[in-house]
Amino acid sequence: MKPQSFVKSLENFYVVKPLNPFKSRVKYMTSFKLAINPYRGCPYKCIYCYIYGYTRMSDIRYPASRKLFKRRLRRDIREYARLGLPKYPVYLSPSCEPLHPFLENRYGNTLYALRTLKEEGFPVIISTKNPSRLLREEYLEALDRKSTTIHISVPFLDNRFEPNASLPIGRIWAASKLVKEGLTVYIRVEPIIPSYGAIAGQSKMELKTIVKEARKAGVYDIISKCLLLSIGVSKVYPSFYKELKPYYLRHGYSDGTYYMLDYNTRIRLLMPLYKACRRNNVRLWTQINDLPFSETPSCNELESLTYFR
Ligand code: SF4
């Protein structure tokens, strides 16, 4: 099936969507994946988050359940089966934290989605900054050990850019427990943020420590990318955006609604992580493209990844 036909066949779906359906990227799609966002907006409000570029301000301020989520998910899954489409992996979730305690306690949409996807036999990739939630019995039961991959985001050792998320050390602890449960766990060290002006990106020591701790937790795979500076960040965290913009103008270029660093700068910023991975016998993954270190937007589309040797 051509990417365009795949995207078209899901046009009338409510909550099951193609991952990264943007026209400009469809022609580069190397593998088909589905995406489900159980919530609108994200209560973690990470300072660097690119969803500010396309999310309504009301959803950024007041994250909530997607309308009629459970009913619409069931309807989409039925329609998907009727169309006879293959069971592509489902990514939970590109534009929100799927396991935020308040939203999950109140609505339970992610738990519902995990149960449904398991029943229907879809492989799942779940990306989270709150992995300890997955250690609850009901979530562990809803995860299919053979076809679930958990991506735990640990870009920093503290909460300086993620003021509302759980502590990074707790995320690594949860990673070790999930590995012991027999689940496949990747750590996402992304975005890599450059240090510039008042912005303190990751130090070499910080990156080394994250890799070491990940390895101790039993994780052998790390995914990374450099920050895409979304213009939308200026709506929510203007000082962060203003501080970094000159750096991106000098070392990168604009790509419509965001700024991207040039190749050499990305290599330079990723190199300490790469070296730390080599030293600890951990694989570093990045997205296939024309460059070895090309971009894989965080909590966003995840197409084919390639191991950078
Ligand atoms: S980076 Fe992820 S967890 Fe943080 S605000 Fe954005 S969507 Fe939420």
Image (spheres, rainbow, N blue to C red):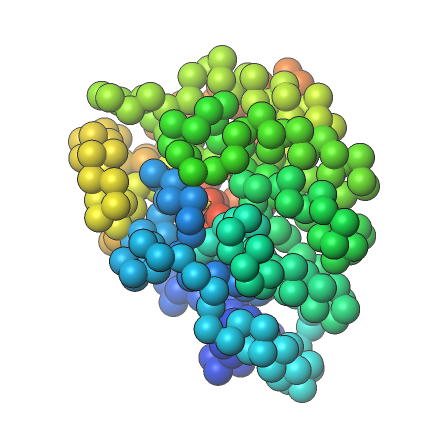
- Residue situated furthest bottom in the rendering: 82
- In the depicted structure, whether residue 178 falls above or below residue 66: above
- In the depicted structure, whether residue 305 falls above or below residue 263: below
Q: Residue at x 72, y 31 (%)?
A: 176
Side of 263 relative to 236 (left or right):
right
- In the depicted structure, whether residue 208 falls above or below residue 298: above
- Quarter-of-image position of residue 56: bottom left
- Quarter-of-image position of residue 110: bottom right
Q: Residue at x 43, y 29 (%)?
A: 159
Image quadrant in which the N terminus is located: bottom right
Give x and y (percent) for residue 97. Answer: 50, 50
Give x and y (percent) for residue 163. Answer: 40, 34
Q: Is residue 303 visible?
A: no
Side of 185 relative to 155 (left or right):
right
Q: Is residue 233 visible?
A: yes
Q: Nearer the viewer, residue 187 or 61?
A: 61
- Quarter-of-image position of residue 26: bottom left
Q: Nearer the viewer, residue 181 or 133?
A: 133
Q: Residue at x 81, y 41 (%)?
A: 182
Q: Nearer the viewer, residue 49 or 266?
A: 49
Image quadrant in which the C terminus is located: top right
- Residue situated furthest top in the rendering: 205
Give x and y (percent) for residue 216. Answer: 71, 21
Give x and y (percent) for residue 279. Answer: 64, 16
How many numbered dots are placed on residues in this image? 0
Q: Nearer the viewer, residue 301 or 233?
A: 233
Side of 197 relative to 308 (left or right):
left
Q: Residue at x 34, y 38 (%)?
A: 47
